[in-house]
Image: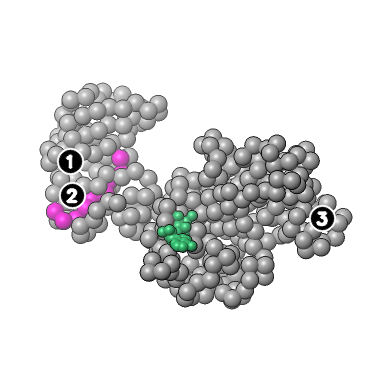
Amino acid sequence: MGIAVENVSKHYGNFRAVDDVSLEIKTGSLVALLGPSGSGKSTLLRMIAGLEIPDAGQIWLVGENATHRSVQERNIGFVFQHYALFKHLTVRENIAFAMELRKANKQRTRQRVEELLELVQLKGFGDRYPSQLSGGQRQRVALARALAVQPRILLLDEPFGALDAKVRKDLRAWLRNLHSEVHVTTVFVTHDQEEAMEVADEIVVMNQGRIEQVGSPAYIYDNPATPFVMSFIGPVNVLPGNAGIAPNRGKVSPSDRVFLRPHDVLIEIEAGDDTTSVIVDRIIHLGWEIRAELALQSGERINAFLSRDQFRKLELQEGQRVYVKPKQAKVFSGAYALT
Ligand code: ADP
Ligand code: MG
């Protein structure tokens, strides 16, 4: 096991930032901690790093109880959103910094820095200063610097958070490739579900200091364990149980909530015995995807996402009456308010 977190809690005053969390992360995997802002992701990561001490519980790193080990003893590489490089040092000097601190052999250090420059695709940038690099290049230098001392574990806290959308997308793919070359156990914090799904082998969904679910991106998307996970991972319509839409024509009590993904709304022109009548209120064209806003008789509104082909076949018009049924949906019992 690369990392094991056992019943770890951390309070700030009366506030539980991390509340009795247990988690196992396999050696060599790339795991995303995903959750909204304030859900405890950074606090958990900082406890794994040794930057915060848990109030309760234990942290094991590579089979060793590290709960009371110092940051230095843990041999971990970090990259944060604003992990400032040393301004007065060149890229090469920044990467070599930790190795020199440890008085590594000079020849070996030079060689390792060149390997790392190649790994992060910055060969030829070694003599530049951080101010002469783009934001994406700087974060790649930060990663090379973190990897220089061959850490057993790499912790990344929203490393691409401050970069613009296009650069972030490129860096996700780049990180994925880097990980398949380096294979260091990596924990990646993000609040962006798409980023987590694209980058990670496994996603840990956090909410209010607790873990809601752990699983592969595909598993979590198809089998969300809680209303929170279903709403956080991808778009969803939430309907009261008496809105006339139920999966498999099952019975749903009015206090239940039906969670229906917009891609799972089937639209038909003719009424069937398991369909519900709706009016097409608005049609929005988004390139390859068409979004239809539908008004139910109960007064509720739902979104349906269609491909262009489906849309053309149906010849949908605003104001038209059509009939819908769920391809699949999930029912969660009891009152549930979306926050
Ligand atoms: P995330 O990284 O998921 O956004 P954090 O772990 O940073 O969440 O924070 C979780 C909660 O703990 C937040 O409500 C935050 O305000 C609180 N918190 C974090 N660090 C401290 C601190 N040093 N003192 C007081 N409260 C803190
Ligand atoms: Mg954070």
Q: CA distance from mark 2 to mark 3?
A: 63 Å
Please tell me which of labels 1 and 2 falls first in the chain: 2
Q: Residues within 10 Å of mark 3 (few under 14, many from 20)?
A: many
Q: Which residues are magenta?
A: 254-262
- The answer to whether residue 251 is visible is no
Disc number at residue 300?
1
Say which quarter of the image contains residue 170.
top right
Q: Which numbered disc, 1 or 3, marks the residue that appears first in the sequence?
A: 3
Kind of residue at badge 1: Glu
Residue at the spot 12% in from the left edge and 38% down from the top edge: 297
Q: Which residue lies under the disc numbered 2?
A: 240
Name the amino acid type tagged 2: Pro
Across and down, in percent, residue 74 comes to: 64, 68
Indicate which disc residue 109 carries: 3
Q: Position of residue 62 (x, y in %)?
A: 62, 70
Q: Is residue 100 above or below residue 72?
A: above
Q: Is mark 1 within 8 Å of ligand 1?
A: no
Pick whichever of labels 2 and 3 is earlier in the sequence: 3
Please determine whether, in this image, residue 145 is positioned above or below residue 274. below
Q: Looking at this view, is 224 or 209 the one in front?
A: 209
Left/right placement of residue 115 relative to residue 226 reads right
Picture disc at residue 121: none
In the image, which is nearer the foreground, mark 2 or mark 3? 3
Q: Position of residue 78 (x, y in %)?
A: 62, 57
* Residue 10 in the image: above or below residue 134: below
The amino acid sitting under disc 3 is Thr
CB of mark 1 within 8 Å of CB of mark 2? yes
